[in-house]
Each structure stands twice: as structure tokens, then as C-alpha cells.
Image (spheres, rainbow, N blue to C red):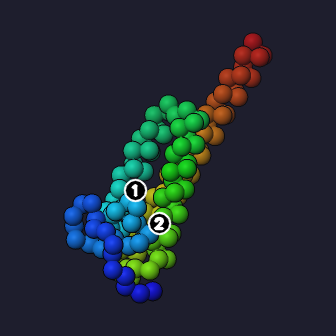
């Protein structure tokens, strides 16, 4: 790994370097992970409400896959990362994994609820 000169500055104007892997987001690693964590918390609340359509679940799943890919790219990218940033990336990656698992569990419970309701209406 080598140090690279960032081509952009963080949109939060924190002065931290923006790695090439986050150039399109224009965020430093810290702010990107904070945004992912915040987004996962919002998605978790939305999922817990039980009002997600299958289209919205698919949209969230795609977003989570994108976050995971970006985190992996940043973690193995060209910018040298402090141990603290490495821990933050791993912690955020775990948050994304848990959110994805929660999303699938929610979808499975909806399918089970629908199939038991359909079964009951057929037997009545």
C-alpha cells in the first residue's frame, strides 16, 4: 500500500484525505462509515415497522451490497489506514451484515405470515 494524494476534499470539510475508492462519494473514511451507520439505523427502523414492500426490500438489499463492496474496497485500497479506521471499517461492515440478515429475516417472516394466512383462508 502506498500513500496517495487525494484528488478531492471531504464534503464535510474535515481536512481528512479522501481515498480514491471514495472519490465519487467525496467523503473521507470516517465520514463514509458514519453515513453508512446512520443509513443502516434508518433502514433498521424502516424494516422493524413491518411496512416494507418487496420492491423496497430489494432496493435496500442492493444498497447494502453497495456499501459492503465499497467498504471492502476502501479497506483493501491504496490509502494507508490507521488501526482506528481499520476497526471502524470492520465495525461498519459488521453493521451492514447484521442489517442484511435482519432484512432477510423480516422478509422470511412476512412470507411465513402470508402463507399461514393463505392456508387459514383456504381451510375456512
Q: Position of residue 12 (x, y in %)?
A: 24, 60
Q: Tell me what residue is drawn at x 51 percent, y 45 percent.
A: 60
Q: Quadrant of residue 37?
A: bottom left
- Badge 2 local density, few (<14 within 10 Å), some, or many (20+)? many
Q: Is residue 106 left or right of residue 11?
A: right
Q: Mark 2 or mark 1: name the one nearer the start of the chain.
A: 1
**Label 2: which secondary element:** helix
Q: Are marks 2 and 1 in contact (CB under 8 Å)?
A: yes
Position of 56 relative to 92 (above/below): above
Q: Tell me what residue is drawn at x 27 percent, y 60 percent.
A: 11
**Label 1: which secondary element:** helix
Q: Tell me what residue is drawn at x 54 percent, y 43 percent.
A: 59
Task: Tell me the residue that label 1 is attached to.
Answer: 36
Q: Tell which of 46 and 60 is nearer to you.
A: 60
Position of 8 relative to 115 (above/below): below
Q: Quadrant of the N terminus?
A: bottom left
Q: Tell me what residue is drawn at x 34 percent, y 62 percent.
A: 26
Q: Is residue 66 left or right of residue 10?
A: right
* View extreme (right): residue: 123
Position of 108 relative to 15 (above/below): above
Q: Quadrant of residue 14?
A: bottom left
Q: Position of residue 50 (x, y in %)?
A: 50, 33
Q: Position of residue 23 (x, y in %)?
A: 39, 66
Q: Quadrant of the C terminus?
A: top right
Task: Tell me the residue that label 2 is attached to.
Answer: 71
Residue 117 is labelled as none
Residue 30 visible in the current orientation: no
- Badge 1 local density, few (<14 within 10 Å), some, or many (20+)? many
Q: Position of residue 7 (x, y in %)?
A: 33, 72
Amino acid at each position: 500500500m502506498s500513500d496517495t494524494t487525494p484528488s478531492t476534499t471531504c464534503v464535510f470539510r474535515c481536512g481528512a484525505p479522501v481515498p480514491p475508492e471514495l472519490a465519487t462519494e467525496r467523503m473521507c473514511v470516517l465520514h463514509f462509515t458514519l453515513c453508512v451507520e446512520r443509513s443502516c439505523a434508518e433502514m433498521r427502523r424502516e424494516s422493524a415497522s413491518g411496512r416494507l414492500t418487496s420492491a423496497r426490500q430489494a432496493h435496500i438489499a442492493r444498497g447494502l451490497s453497495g456499501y459492503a463492496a465499497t467498504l471492502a474496497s476502501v479497506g483493501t485500497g491504496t490509502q494507508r489506514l490507521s488501526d482506528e479506521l481499520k476497526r471502524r471499517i470492520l465495525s461498519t461492515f459488521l453493521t451492514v451484515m447484521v442489517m442484511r440478515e435482519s432484512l432477510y429475516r423480516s422478509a422470511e417472516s412476512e412470507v411465513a405470515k402470508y402463507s399461514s394466512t393463505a392456508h387459514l383462508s383456504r381451510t375456512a
